[in-house]
Amino acid sequence: MIKITTLLRALVAALFASSSLAFSVLPAGTTSQIKAVSSSTEVSMGLFDFFSEEAKQKREAKRQREIEEQERLQKAIMERRRNPDLMEDYEANVQYRRELIMQDKFDEANKVDLYKRADKETLLDGTKGEVAEE
């Protein structure tokens, strides 16, 4: 019984070690237990890695790719709204996807492509907008 309470105290102390409320008196010999528990929560990334030039470039490239993808999808939506044949295909795909979901076939439903031909769309500035992958 004493070992369980000692372990519980060590666990509680380890969980609240970073807060200002973490003041408790621990029995002797529990510091090694605290170190074992708290070492698993250490952060492996450096604090300032986020601000490095390489990290900024990666974030900017990712942001640019997301913008390009959104532009392509928006152009595909606009084209679909103007073209009755494309709109009819889209509505059939939506209905098929809904039926799959109602049958609990979520994996198959997620594979239904509602944005056909979006990858062939150019961007608003007229380019393909392909950013080099890193």
Image: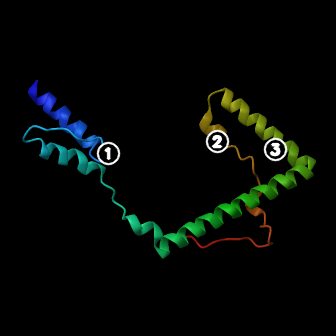
Local packing at callout 2 (Cα closer than 10 Å; few below 14, some 14-19, many 20+) is few
How far from the left and from the top, in percent, is residue 83? Answer: 91, 51
- Point out the frontmost of discs 2 and 1: 1
Label whose residue precedes the other's in the sequence (1 or 3):
1
The amino acid at mark 1 is: Ser
Query: How many tags in the picture?
Result: 3
Label whose residue precedes the other's in the sequence (2 or 1):
1
How far from the left and from the top, in percent, is residue 81? Answer: 88, 49
Q: Name the residue under label 3.
A: 90
Location of residue 93 (image quadrant):
top right
Q: Mark 2 points at which residue?
A: 110
Most extreme residue toward the left is: 28
Q: Which residue is nearer to you in this view: 89 or 35?
A: 35
User: Residue 21, can we see it?
Assistant: yes
Location of residue 62 (image quadrant):
bottom right
How far from the left and from the top, in percent, is residue 116? Answer: 76, 52
Q: Which residue is nearer to you in this view: 61 or 91?
A: 61
Q: In this view, does 31 lie to the left or right of 52?
A: left
The amino acid at mark 2 is: Asn
Between the residue at mark 1 and the residue at mark 3, the CA separation in whole angstroms equals 54 Å
The amino acid at mark 3 is: Tyr
Q: Mark 1 points at which residue?
A: 19
Local packing at callout 3 (Cα closer than 10 Å; few below 14, some 14-19, many 20+) is some
Q: In this view, does 30 lie to the left or right of 117?
A: left
Between the residue at mark 2 and the residue at mark 1, the CA separation in whole angstroms equals 43 Å
Location of residue 125 (image quadrant):
bottom right
